[in-house]
Amino acid sequence: MDQLPSTTQLFSDIRELIDHSRQKVARTVNTELSYLYWSIGKLLKTEILKDERATYGQKMIETLSKNLTYEYGRGWSKRLLWDCLKCVEVFPDEQILQAVTAELTWTHLQQLFGVEDPLKRDFYIELCRHEKWSTRQLRERIHSQLFERTAISRKPDETIRHDLEVLKNEKKLSPDLTFRDPYLLDFLGLADTYSEDDLESAILAELQRFLIEFGTDFAFLAKQKRITIDRRDYSIDLLFYHRRLKCLIAIDLKIGEFEAAHKGQMELYLRYLEKYEHVEGENLPVGLILCAGKNEEHVELLQLEKSNIRVAEYLTVLPPREILQAKLHKAIEGARLRLEKSEETPK
């Protein structure tokens, strides 16, 4: 499209105004639509509570769906009306609804209705806000049980609430909201047998999807980062920077199970990065050891978090959802029991 030199800046300014206005209109429409559905849900709830018969609500919803569809056309399904009712149950306070719909759409809310646990639902709301997930991304993360895979799920409820409040009010992301276990790397397409080089190459080939699984704040810096200590050469498999945590993240890839010796290797990497790569204003570097398996007692006894080291499994083939769910719930319960025992032990 031809433009006169004198109109180039004017065109750019007008385009910016149009884009800004469209975004503002879209946000307003979404907020009004969500409020409409919430208001409908409030009326439905009041009407259903008037009648104690179990079948009354179902018959009422069915009749209303037919009448609304006849009056306003497609879209007023029974499912939508049940979602309106669910919206009031999940967000009974109008002010809370307004705060959420300022950033999340009605389709986001519909995905959240299926998350029964309020604390878990708050986790998805805040992470969705923070990482600006699409509805599809939110649905995928709920399906992949992101909450149960995130380190925060192993902590007491009070800690989870605190970290979510800090993220919400101060935009600060804690390490426990950042790191996961296990990581789902099924998209790498690895064969039944593979080497650490194969794993690294597959990650680099699918770096964008790898970063989606890890989180939007990770920035890739280097592969096989070479460091020299006492004239001996070492290589850090992958080096990232985390914008919110403001620190370097060194990742060591292992195709076998976690071993105690891996701690010493990672400590060496971290101390080097702290001495030679650390920039003023940054936090101390964090190490993440990704392995095919780990023994929880090994991890507990080595007290890795004191050295700023985390260990996580990765899965290159996804098990059935029920098996993954059982595995995660067992890990969460085990972690919380160990935490309770440690707090009961006299110092």
Image (cartoon, helix red, strand yellow):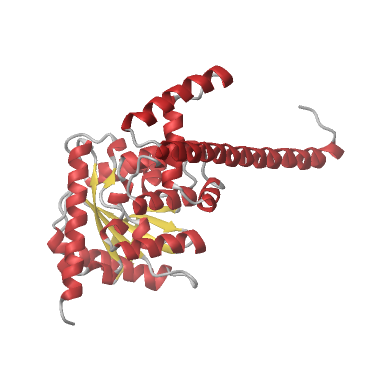
Among all residues in the image, which is located at the extreme top?
70
Classify residue 200 by image quadrant: top left
In the image, taking residue 52 as reference, residue 254 lies left or right, namely: left
- In the picture shown, does residue 90 fall above or below 252? above
- In the picture shown, does residue 25 fall above or below 97? above
The x, y position of residue 227, in whole percent, is 34, 63
The quarter of the picture where the N terminus appears is top right
In the image, taking residue 274 as reference, residue 234 lies left or right, namely: left
The answer to whether residue 1 of the structure is visible from this angle is yes
The quarter of the picture where the C terminus appears is bottom left
Between 108 and 218, the residue placed more toward the observer is 108
The x, y position of residue 66, in whole percent, is 48, 19
The x, y position of residue 230, in whole percent, is 28, 72
Q: Residue at x 21, y 62 (%)?
A: 336
Q: Residue at x 57, y 19 (%)?
A: 71
Q: Residue at x 51, y 62 (%)?
A: 169
- In the picture shown, does residue 320 fall above or below 292? above
Q: Residue at x 46, y 48 (%)?
A: 91
In the image, taking residue 219 as reference, residue 328 lies left or right, namely: left
Between 35 and 146, the residue placed more toward the observer is 35
